[in-house]
Amino acid sequence: MPTPSPVIIVGYDGSPSSRAALRLALDRLGSGKLFLVHGYHAPAEFWGAEHHDRLVEAALDRGEAVLAEAATVEPRLAGAEHELELIAGRPADVIIAVAETRGADEIIVGTRGFGPVRGVLGSVAHALLRDAACPLTAVPDAAVERLTARAGEDRISTP
């Protein structure tokens, strides 16, 4: 029986934990397809402000740069079937929309644990855990060093 070809969504912001999430996704991908997703937006409190357009443009430019550097950070990306998705919106909402549209089998994200209430998971991972319709793997910053040391600098493998 042929091995299934998974569809994996990776939320990517260039942080160490999102780079680890990308590596983990590539370890799991096999002959599947990967969607590397970056959501960008200017906070709502800036809507209508005279500098709103500059903030959105800066966020878009940063998103383009972050996605462009992914292949440098993880050379295996070039050999995998993948698409880059740069979409305006809150990152969790964007990741969920792409996962639903693409029929994702799994979402993999890094988490930095920012935010007072969601300090353990991070707000994006917390929202995905609550709202995603497929399995979620979250790679916290605290695990990046351990996973990298265990698997070597070039690769992070699944436990």
Image: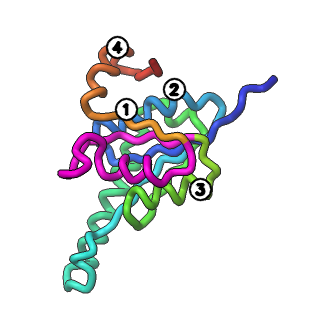
Q: Earlier in the sequence, mark 1 or mark 3?
A: 1
Q: Is residue 2 left or right of residue 80?
A: right
Q: Quadrant of the N terminus?
A: top right
Task: Find the distance from the CA under tag 4 to the CA under tag 1.
Answer: 13 Å
State whether residue 138 appears in this view.
yes
* Front position in the image: 86 or 144: 144
Identity, as a three-letter code, of the amino acid under mark 1: Ala
Give the numbered dot on residue 27: 2
- Residue type of the residue flagged with mark 3: Glu
Kindly identify which residue carries mark 3: 100
Q: Is 35 positioned to the left or the right of 47 in the image?
A: right
Residue 125 drawn at (x, y percent): 37, 47
Q: CA distance from mark 1 to mark 2?
A: 10 Å
**Residues at discs 4 and 1 in contact (Cβ within 8 Å):** no
* Local SS, label 1: helix
First along the sequence among labels 3 and 4:
3
